[in-house]
């Protein structure tokens, strides 16, 4: 398979050919009838016609993807995907519009389409097999003390008025974040049942009571008491989740500055994707070896997720 390189970022034909290689490894796939490698080229470069008698439809590699009907040159889409995937704390739409030479509105739409592509189409369950999963939550929103004096709510304490992001982090594995209205035993139980192989998972959390009430669901549950200054006790800690939140919050505060509740889940999905396709190192025969995904491989993984998804401007704003 060809590698993503500079040519794909300034040449539309090279970008099209690259996209066809990663989306159609076995030949052109008709998005209308699903037939594989049963199409022929037309006079228009990049346009194919399905050879199935019942179909005979024309299509390109972008039909049936988040790029469909976009007037933005394909090479700019590939560059945008690389920039979003290579920036550890994300890239704002305002920065992207300056880099790509498109309007701010266009850049904003592009970033949301790419976040849609980053969604895991077949997430499966985390944990299982005796693995350890950490559960924790963080709050997103401005601090009252930073507001003008006449706009402060003196009753707003702690997380009140903020948005909550709940994350499950499998040690040495993936993270999954959800934008929830609140975290309580009653609304966490169905979430944990749908996201974890609970009976074969060891849960590690802080000392919040909602987790202790749900301990019966797991193979084991250990927690640390942050209020008493306890952060690690053996394998009982949620430092992996805290590390993830540190990157997530730096992106929200330092790159995006403000994220509305309406779109917070998409931003969480973006940070999940980069974490789940991160580059790591491990020791092999006494030497450190890089594993995981490079920036280019991460961008390619995002491009593989564009198929079967459509996102219109109206849907984003809805």
Image (cartoon, rainbow, N blue to C red):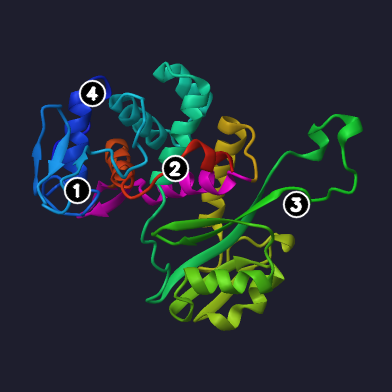
Which residue is the extreme one toward the front? 54
- Judged left or right of residue 210, residue 179 is left
Check the picture and name the quadrant holding the C terminus. Answer: top right
How far across and how far down the image is residue 80, in percent? 38, 29
Query: How far is mark 3 from mark 4, CA to CA?
Result: 47 Å
Which numbered tag is attached to residue 159? 3
Query: How far is mark 2 from mark 3, CA to CA?
Result: 32 Å
Q: For the residue labelled by badge 4, is the local secondary structure a helix, a strand or a loop?
A: helix
Image point (36%, 30%), residue name = 70
Precedes in sequence: disc 4 or disc 2:
4
Precedes in sequence: disc 1 or disc 2:
1
Q: Which residue is mark 4?
A: 12
Q: Would you identify the image quadrant in which residue 63 lies? A: top left
Precedes in sequence: disc 1 or disc 3:
1
Q: For the residue labelled by badge 2, is the local secondary structure a helix, a strand or a loop?
A: loop
From the viewer's perspective, is residue 218 above or below residue 29?
Answer: below
Precedes in sequence: disc 3 or disc 4:
4
**Residues at marks 1 and 2 touching, judged by CB atoms closer than 8 Å:** no
Image point (31%, 24%), residue name = 73
Residue 46 vs residue 178, the one in the foreground = 46
Please tell me whether residue 227 belongs to the stretch shown in magenta: no
Residue 110 vs residue 233, the one in the foreground = 110
**Residues at marks 2 and 3 touching, judged by CB atoms closer than 8 Å:** no
Task: Give the number of callouts.
Answer: 4
Which numbered tag is attached to residue 311? 2
Q: Which residue is mark 1?
A: 30
Image point (69%, 60%), residue name = 182
Instruction: Write the start and end of the magenta stretch as one range.
Output: 262-291
Query: How far is mark 1 from mark 2, CA to CA?
Result: 20 Å
């Amino acid at each position: 398979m060809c590698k993503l390189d500079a040519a794909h970022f300034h040449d539309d034909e090279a970008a099209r050919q690259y996209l066809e290689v990663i989306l159609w490894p076995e030949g052109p796939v008709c998005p209308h009838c699903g037939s594989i490698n049963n199409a022929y080229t037309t006079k228009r470069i990049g346009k194919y016609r399905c050879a199935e008698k019942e179909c005979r439809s024309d299509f390109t590699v972008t039909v049936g993807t988040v790029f469909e009907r976009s007037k933005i040159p394909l090479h700019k889409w590939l560059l945008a995907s690389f920039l979003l995937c290579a920036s550890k704390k994300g890239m704002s739409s305002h920065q992207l519009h300056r880099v790509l030479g498109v309007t701010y509105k266009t850049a904003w739409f592009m970033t949301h389409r790419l976040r849609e592509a980053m969604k895991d189409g077949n997430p499966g369950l985390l944990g299982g097999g005796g693995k350890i999963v950490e559960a924790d939550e963080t709050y997103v929103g401005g601090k009252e003390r930073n507001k003008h004096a006449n706009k402060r709510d003196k009753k707003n304490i702690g997380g009140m008025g903020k948005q909550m992001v709940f994350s499950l982090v499998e040690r040495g594995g993936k993270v999954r974040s959800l934008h929830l209205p609140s975290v309580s035993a009653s609304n966490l139980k169905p979430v944990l049942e749908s996201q974890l192989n609970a009976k074969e998972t060891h849960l590690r959390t802080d000392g919040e009571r909602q987790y202790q009430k749900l301990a019966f669901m797991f193979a084991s549950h250990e927690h640390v008491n942050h209020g008493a200054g306890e952060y690690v006790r053996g394998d009982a800690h949620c430092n992996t989740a805290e590390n993830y939140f540190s990157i997530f919050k730096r992106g929200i505060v330092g790159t995006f500055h403000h994220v509305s509740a309406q779109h917070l889940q998409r931003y969480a999905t973006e940070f999940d994707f980069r974490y789940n396709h991160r580059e790591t190192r491990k020791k092999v025969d006494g030497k450190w070896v890089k594993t995981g995904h490079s920036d280019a491989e991460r961008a390619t993984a995002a491009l593989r997720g564009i198929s079967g998804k459509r996102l219109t401007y109206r849907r984003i704003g809805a």
